[in-house]
Image (spheres, rainbow, N blue to C red):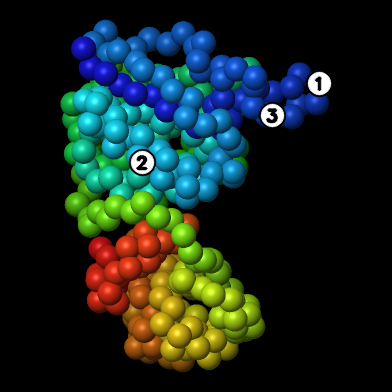
C-alpha cells in the first residue's frame, strides 16, 4: 500500500456558502473530512487538519510548520503528500516548500475556487486529482506540484491569474508541466533543478514595491528609514525603473540591504538590457540583483530564505539568480 498524507490547511475548499447572505466562510467541520472520493486502490490516506485558515491569513510560520510536518512524514515513509490550501496564497506556500524541501516524494497542493456547497464546486474534484497525482510514480522528483482544474503546474512558476474562474492557475511563459485525464496522469515537460535551501527561521522585513509610470523615490526613501532586511521591486518591462527612484535605491544598497528586481510583466524574464538612465544595465551596475523568471511574491520568499541563512553577498546573488 502507498501511504499518502493529506494536510488540510483551510481555504475555500474547506468553506461553505451561506444560502441567505451568499457569504463564504469556513464550516464547523471541514467538508473534505467527510467527503466520498474515489482513491486509487493501492492508496491509504492519512488525514490531518494541520490548521484551518483562509489563505490570506497564511504566514511564513505556517509554511515552516508545513515543511517540518512534511520532513517528518518523509521520515515516516509516506510516499506522497497532498496539501489543501486557499488559492490566494497557494503559490507562495508551494514555492516555499519547493525551495526548502527539494525534489523528494511527490508534494501536491490543491484548492478550490468554489466552496463545497456551491453549484459546480471544484473542491472534491481537485482533491481527488491531487491524490491521483501524489500517488503516481512519475510525480517523484518533479519538485512541489500544484494540481487544479486537470492541470499539473510546477510550484516554481505557477500563479493565480483570475479572481473567480476555476481555470485560475497558470504558468506564464512555460505552461503546465502535465495534465490529469480521466485515465492517466501525463507529464509533458520537466524543470531543470534549482538550488534548494532549507531554513528554520523566517524572520525579517522584506516588502515588495511595484514600479509605475511617474514613480518617485519617496516610497522607497520612507522604506529605507525602517530596518529593512531586503526589498523586492517589480520593475517595468525587461527590468527598468523611472530615474527618480534611483537615489533612494542607492541609499539602500549603501546600507547593504539586498535589492532584488523582477519584472511586473506576466510573461518573460527580467534582464539588464537597456543603457538609458534607469535602464537595466544601470540598475545592475548599482548592485540590484536581477532575479529571473519568478514573480515578486516568490522572490520575496526566496530572499527571506536567503537572508535567514545569512548568505554572503556572492552566495545570495547566486541563489537569487538560480
Ligand atoms: N480567499 C480564499 C483563500 O485563499 C480563496 C480560495 O481558497 O480559493 O482562502
Q: Determine whether the residue tagged by mark 3 lies in a helix, strand or loop.
A: strand
Location of residue 217 by image quarter: bottom right
Q: Is mark 3 within 8 Å of ligand 1?
A: yes
Residue at the far right: name it.
20
The quadrant in which the C terminus is found is bottom left
Q: Is 222 drawn above or below residue 23 in the view shown?
A: below
Location of residue 94 by image quarter: top left
Percent across and percent down for residue 131 are 34, 22
Viewer-closest of 307 and 276: 307
Q: Is residue 85 left or right of residue 38?
A: right
Pointers 3 and 2 in contact (CB under 8 A)? Answer: no
Give the residue drawn at x 74%, y 29%. Answer: 23
Report how far apart the C-alphas of labels 1 and 2 lie in the structure. Answer: 39 Å
Q: Earlier in the sequence, mark 3 or mark 2?
A: 3
Q: Is 43 drawn above or below residue 171 in the view shown?
A: above
Q: Is 198 drawn above or below residue 163 in the view shown?
A: below
Give the residue drawn at x 54%, y 44%. Answer: 58
Give the residue drawn at x 40%, y 38%. Answer: 66
Q: Residues within 10 Å of mark 1 (few under 14, many from 20)?
A: few
Percent across and percent down for residue 296 are 46, 61
> What residue did someone put label 1 on?
20
> What residue did someone put label 3 on?
24
- Observer-side mark, 3 or 2, equals 2
Percent across and percent down for residue 196 are 25, 54
Q: Residues within 10 Å of mark 2 (few under 14, many from 20)?
A: many
> What residue did someone put label 2 on?
67
Report how far apart the C-alphas of labels 1 and 3 lie in the structure. Answer: 11 Å
Report how far apart the C-alphas of labels 3 and 2 lie in the structure. Answer: 28 Å
Q: Is residue 45 left or right of residue 104?
A: right
Give the residue drawn at x 39%, y 24%. Answer: 6
Amino acid at each position: 500500500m502507498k501511504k499518502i498524507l493529506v494536510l488540510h490547511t483551510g481555504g475555500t475548499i474547506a468553506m461553505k456558502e451561506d444560502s441567505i447572505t451568499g457569504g463564504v466562510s469556513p464550516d464547523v467541520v471541514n467538508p473534505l473530512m467527510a467527503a466520498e472520493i474515489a482513491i486509487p486502490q493501492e492508496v491509504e490516506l492519512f488525514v490531518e487538519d494541520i490548521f484551518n485558515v483562509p489563505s490570506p491569513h497564511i504566514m511564513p510560520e505556517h509554511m515552516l510548520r508545513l515543511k517540518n510536518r512534511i520532513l517528518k512524514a518523509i521520515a515516516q515513509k509516506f510516499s506522497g503528500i497532498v496539501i489543501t490550501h486557499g488559492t490566494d496564497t497557494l503559490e507562495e506556500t508551494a514555492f516555499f516548500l519547493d525551495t526548502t524541501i527539494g525534489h523528494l516524494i511527490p508534494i501536491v497542493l490543491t484548492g478550490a475556487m468554489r466552496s463545497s456547497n456551491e453549484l459546480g464546486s471544484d473542491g472534491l474534484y481537485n482533491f481527488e486529482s491531487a491524490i491521483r497525482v501524489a500517488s503516481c510514480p512519475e510525480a517523484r522528483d518533479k519538485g512541489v506540484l500544484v494540481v487544479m482544474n486537470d492541470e499539473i503546474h510546477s510550484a516554481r512558476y505557477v500563479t493565480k491569474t483570475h479572481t473567480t474562474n476555476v481555470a485560475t492557475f497558470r504558468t506564464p511563459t512555460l505552461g503546465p508541466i502535465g495534465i490529469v485525464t480521466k485515465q492517466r496522469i501525463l507529464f509533458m515537460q520537466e524543470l531543470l533543478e534549482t538550488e534548494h535551501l532549507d531554513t528554520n527561521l523566517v524572520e525579517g522585513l522584506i516588502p515588495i514595491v511595484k514600479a509605475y509610470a511617474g514613480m518617485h523615490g519617496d516610497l522607497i526613501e520612507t522604506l529605507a528609514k525602517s530596518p529593512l532586511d531586503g526589498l523586492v521591486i517589480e520593475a517595468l518591462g525587461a527590468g527598468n525603473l523611472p530615474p527618480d527612484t534611483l537615489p533612494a535605491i542607492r541609499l539602500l544598497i549603501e546600507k547593504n540591504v539586498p535589492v532584488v528586481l523582477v519584472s511586473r510583466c506576466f510573461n518573460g524574464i527580467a534582464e539588464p538590457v537597456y543603457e538609458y538612465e534607469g535602464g537595466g544595465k544601470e540598475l545592475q551596475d548599482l548592485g540590484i540583483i536581477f532575479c529571473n523568471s519568478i514573480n515578486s511574491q516568490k522572490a520575496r520568499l526566496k530572499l527571506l530564505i536567503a537572508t535567514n541563512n545569512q548568505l554572503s553577498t556572492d552566495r545570495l546573488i547566486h541563489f537569487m539568480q538560480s
